[in-house]
Image: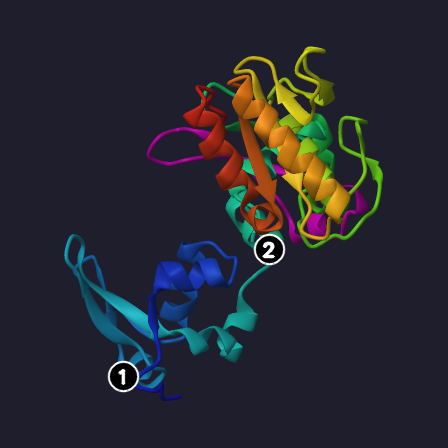
Amino acid sequence: MTASTHEKHISTTALARSLAKESKEVFVLLAKGGWIIKVDGHWQLTAKGRFEGGIYLTHPKFGEYIAWPESVQNHPIFLMLPDAPLSATHLGQKAGLPARLVNLLLAERGWIKKYLHGWCLTPAGAALGGQQQENEQSGIPYVTWPETLLEQPAYQHIVMSLSPNLSVTEGRALNGQGYRNSAERLINNWLYLTGVNYATSYALAEDIGVTADFFVPEIRLCIDYWDAQANAATISNQLEKQQRYRQHQISFLELRDTDLPLLDEVLARELFRHGMAVY
């Protein structure tokens, strides 16, 4: 196999991430396949590895390392990888979610629980095949999961609760709170999972005459969703609400459709700007 000279190359660790496998398993597989060999404690390319597209790149901080063309992940050799236990990072990559939110979802179901630093397996999680692990350097506990977890309806349900691609009209969030559209579903579930105390359809003081979609009392922040498909009357009401917020010096945040795929980043940043940190 030869790679295009213009093709992007990635490290073996990045290759493992793209395969949703542990990097050490990929290194072992490539060594067994004769692609790389360890010399004086460092991995070196073999003639076979060069044939498969491996090259050396240099990082300004970490020095020389082996890199592979991105297309190499389609090579048949990687079908030999075992069904490796999946960390929260791997689960997040498959679901399109940050690992932090994946752990919060698993904890909400009672499958793991928060430790001082890291996460510990519960009996319910063990019944699903979860395994307790510990970081070799820091000792921080974490949990890995079998690939069969991906087929569990209960797991699929909680992952979809934060998916911006699920189109729904109404229903109930993870905490039982009702929602009227996908945006409200996402916002409700994010606030609930991150432990933010909030209210929905919150009516401010009568002299203000405004009802916020969401209200965070700790920092007195109003959060509203602006629907891109809203009719003229709704847009007029939204603009009037915006004016009243400013008139009464009320902190507010407006979320639009473009914010929804980046909701974790957007909401965490905006709450921090208003004096609240979420973890």
Name the mark nearer the viewer: 1 or 2.
2
Q: Which is nearer the N-term, disc 1 or disc 2?
A: 1
Per the rendering, the mark at residue 47 is 1
Q: Rounded to the nearest whole Å, what is the CA distance between mark 1 and mark 2?
A: 33 Å
Q: Name the residue: 74% across, 52% down.
A: 166
- The span picked out in magenta is 129-154
Per the rendering, the mark at residue 97 is none
| Rendered view: 16 above or below 240 | below
Q: Residues within 10 Å of mark 2 (few under 14, many from 20)?
A: few
**Residue 223 locus on image (x, y percent):** 61, 29
Instruction: Check disc 1 and report its element: helix, strand or loop.
Output: helix
Using the image as rendered, state which of residue 25 and residue 271 is in the foreground.
271
Q: Name the residue: 56% across, 16% down.
A: 220
What's the colour scheme? rainbow
Residue 130 in view in this figure: yes
Residue pointed to by mark 2: 94
Residue 16 in magenta stretch: no
**Residue 228 locus on image (x, y percent):** 67, 51
32 displayed left or right of 109: left
